[in-house]
Image (cartoon, grey):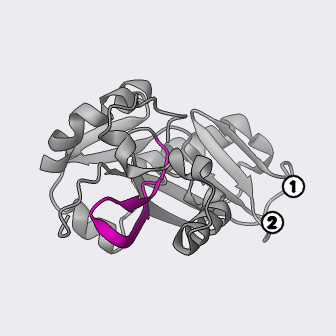
């Protein structure tokens, strides 16, 4: 980074769709390798592929390969790789959803949830997911940078754990955070010889 901080993080692209309001067959959410689905307040569903993410191969991929190898091996069926060119531009702006993945999501919806299979996709989008080697976020002070705190690498869990992460960050900034809570998310775990065991795949 421009601050001289070594931060192991790679980015994958996920494809998501929103359906029109449809029959209420699910309150909450469901996941399997071919589909992830969640009921929306507007009566529709948010739908994603349960295990298809695209990573653009860059020099940073090669630099971080050793740290990410266990996570890649664990989730190898869900991560596809292609040569990267303008992926950083896409990340900063508005990445497009992948048309083949949308077709796979539609087929999975018809197979798994035929009662709502005729609900059209009224909106589709691509979203960038910043992942850490162990699929846990980094929420940490940084050695040598007094007063600086980093919170990133949420690995697709950011919306779900956002309120708790925000509370932890506020406590850390005030100096009242529980040391045990902070320990699991420290940046130094990637450099101090701690075993890196990936959690559930993205």
Q: Position of residue 109 (x, y in %)?
A: 66, 43
Question: Is 14 included in the stretch rendered in magenta?
Answer: no
Identify the residue position indicated by label 2 in the image.
Answer: 43
Identify the residue position indicated by label 1 in the image.
Answer: 24
Res. 35 image quadrant: top right
Above/below status of 31 relative to 3: above
- Packing grade of label 2 (10 A; few <14, some 14-19, many >=20) is few
Residue drawn where x is 86% and y is 48% of the image: 25
Instruction: Mark yes or no: residue 68 visible.
Output: yes
User: How many angstroms separate mark 1 from mark 2 (CA)?
Assistant: 7 Å
Q: Position of residue 74 (x, y in %)?
A: 43, 25
Name the element at disc 2.
Answer: loop
Q: Position of residue 8 (x, y in %)?
A: 29, 48
In this rendered view, identify the residue nearer to me: 3 or 99. Answer: 3
Q: Which residues are magenta?
A: 135-153
Name the element at disc 1.
Answer: loop
Chief SS of the magenta region: strand
Residue drawn where x is 40% and y is 28% of the image: 195
Q: Position of residue 40 (x, y in %)?
A: 75, 64
Tag 1 and tag 2, C-beta contact below 8 Å: yes
């Amino acid at each position: 980074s421009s601050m001289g901080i070594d931060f192991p993080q790679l980015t994958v692209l996920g494809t998501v769709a929103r359906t029109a309001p449809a029959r209420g067959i699910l309150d909450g959410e469901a996941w399997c390798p071919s589909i992830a689905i969640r009921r929306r307040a507007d009566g529709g569903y948010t739908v994603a592929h349960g295990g298809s993410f695209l990573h653009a191969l860059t020099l940073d991929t090669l630099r971080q390969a050793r740290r990410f190898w266990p996570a890649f091996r664990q989730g190898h069926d869900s991560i596809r790789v292609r040569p990267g060119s303008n992926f950083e531009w896409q990340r900063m702006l508005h990445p497009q959803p992948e048309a083949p993945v949308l077709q796979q999501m539609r087929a999975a919806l018809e197979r798994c949830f035929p009662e709502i299979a005729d609900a059209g996709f009224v909106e589709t989008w691509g979203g960038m997911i910043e992942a850490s080697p162990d699929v846990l976020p980094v929420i940490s002070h940084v050695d040598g940078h007094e007063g600086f705190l980093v919170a990133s690498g949420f690995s697709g869990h950011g919306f779900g754990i956002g309120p708790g992460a925000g509370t932890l960050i506020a406590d850390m900034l005030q100096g009242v955070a529980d040391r045990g809570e902070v320990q699991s998310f420290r940046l130094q775990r990637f450099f101090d010889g701690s075993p890196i065991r990936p959690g559930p795949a993205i």
